[in-house]
Image: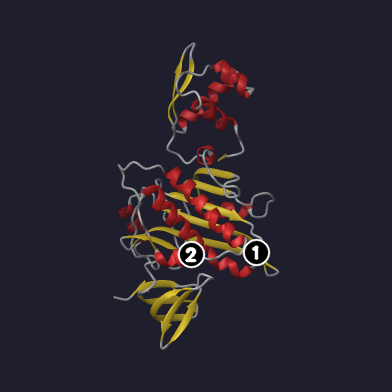
């Protein structure tokens, strides 16, 4: 595990980035970091193993040639335009589940806004404990928030998160995904991202929210489809970026965290205007004839919109029904 607050590697990377026109001597690094020359060398080797291309030259020192492609915490922090979300970042090459780790952080102080990132998950999960395939090439993250607002707003977060991610994808990749209620992003009617929200509520107050987000950034969608084809409500998977396309996952992740914080701040101050309309503009669900499977049973009708709490409004049997949860399929 690497974190954004264990800053030796972060400082070395920042120093190398600020001196990319030439070499930075081991002596200068040693003096700036308060480390021995041997410790500097060991950390340089560690960075090289993490994917940084660093040239070393006797009597000259070290020079950064190219940065890593990994979503390391100091790379995500560098240029992140948020105040709360991403205050602390935890990074894993492989983890069982970012959601499980973030839920453990929830009991600790000073962790609101913490982000957990993994290159790969071995036991990722979706809603209703469904299996979530999380191979290398995706963006698998969980975000811990400890908001100070009323319980009813908790139901907004699948909508808020999917909208924030859609806006970030539009801005960074110039792709326009659709939003499938309650919490999926799709391209060509196949899932490209999904959202899971775990909430703890005590005495009618939200204790914490953990938002899990899985993004098929640059993955083999055929392989994922083979793994998940027999799972509940699977309707196909696709990828945002093809294998040889140039795109930086860090830029998308930074944009997403920024957009999510902007929407989160609106909820905190009670300014929900515009959020519903922006979601509906991008929706593949609104206007469709749908079948929804929910804990209360099966509902068939026409999706006519969502309300300010993120509930789907379905016109069925002569009246409008309001659904907060459920699996949606489209009627042909």
| Residue matched to label 1 | 149
Say what secondary structure mark 2 lies in: helix
Provide residue 113's location: percent of width, then percent of height.
60, 51
Q: Is residue 3 above or below residue 149?
A: above
User: Which quadrant would residue 30 be assigned to in this image?
Assistant: top right
Left or right: residue 220 compared with residue 39: left
Rendered-image quadrant of the N terminus: top right
The one of 53 and 164 positioned closer to us in this rendering: 164
Left or right: residue 210 compared with residue 125: right
As drawn, the label of residue 47 is none
What residue is shown at x 58% (from left), y 50% (from top)? 85
Q: Is residue 177 above or below residue 291?
A: above
Provide residue 5's location: percent of width, then percent of height.
61, 38
What residue is shown at x 40% (from left), y 76% (from top)? 303
Q: Is residue 278 above or below residue 118?
A: below
What crowding class fits label 2: few (fewer than 14 Cα within 10 Å), some (14-19), or many (20 or more)? some
Provide residue 145's location: percent of width, then percent of height.
61, 56
Say what secondary structure mark 1 lies in: loop
- Mark 1 or mark 2: whose residue is earlier in sequence: 2
Q: CA distance from mark 1 to mark 2?
A: 24 Å
What crowding class fits label 1: few (fewer than 14 Cα within 10 Å), some (14-19), or many (20 or more)? some
Left or right: residue 152 compared with residue 251: right
Tell how many labels. Answer: 2
As drawn, the label of residue 127 is 2
């Amino acid at each position: 595990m690497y974190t954004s607050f264990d800053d030796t590697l972060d400082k070395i990377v920042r120093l190398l980035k600020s001196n990319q026109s030439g070499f930075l001597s081991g002596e200068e690094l040693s003096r700036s970091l308060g480390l021995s020359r041997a410790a500097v060398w060991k950390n340089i080797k560690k960075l090289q193993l993490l994917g940084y291309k660093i040239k070393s030259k006797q009597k000259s020192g070290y020079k950064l040639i190219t940065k890593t492609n990994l979503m390391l915490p100091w790379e995500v922090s560098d240029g992140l335009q948020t105040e709360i979300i991403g205050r602390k970042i935890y990074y894993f090459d492989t983890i069982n589940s970012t959601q499980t780790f973030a839920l453990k952080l929830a009991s600790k102080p000073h962790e609101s806004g913490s982000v957990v990132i993994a290159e790969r998950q071995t036991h990722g999960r979706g809603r209703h404990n469904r299996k979530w395939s999380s191979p290398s090439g995706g963006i698998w993250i969980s975000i811990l928030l400890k908001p100070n607002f009323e319980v009813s707003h908790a139901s907004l977060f699948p909508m808020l998160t999917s909208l924030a991610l859609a806006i970030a994808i539009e801005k960074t990749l110039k792709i326009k995904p659709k939003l499938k209620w309650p919490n999926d992003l799709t391209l060509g009617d196949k899932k490209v991202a999904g959202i899971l929200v775990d909430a703890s509520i005590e005495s009618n107050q939200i204790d914490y929210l953990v938002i899990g987000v899985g993004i098929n950034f640059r993955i083999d969608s055929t392989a994922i489809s083979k793994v998940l084809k027999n799972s509940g409500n699977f309707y196909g998977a696709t990828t945002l970026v093809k294998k040889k396309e140039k795109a930086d996952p860090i830029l998308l992740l930074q944009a997403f965290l920024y957009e999510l914080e902007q929407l989160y701040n609106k909820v905190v101050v009670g300014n929900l205007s515009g959020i519903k309309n922006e979601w509906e503009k991008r929706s593949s669900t609104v206007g469709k004839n749908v079948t929804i499977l929910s804990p209360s049973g099966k509902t068939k009708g026409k999706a006519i919109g969502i309300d300010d709490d993120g509930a789907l409004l379905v016109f069925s049997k002569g009246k409008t029904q309001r659904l907060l949860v459920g699996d949606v399929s489209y009627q042909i």
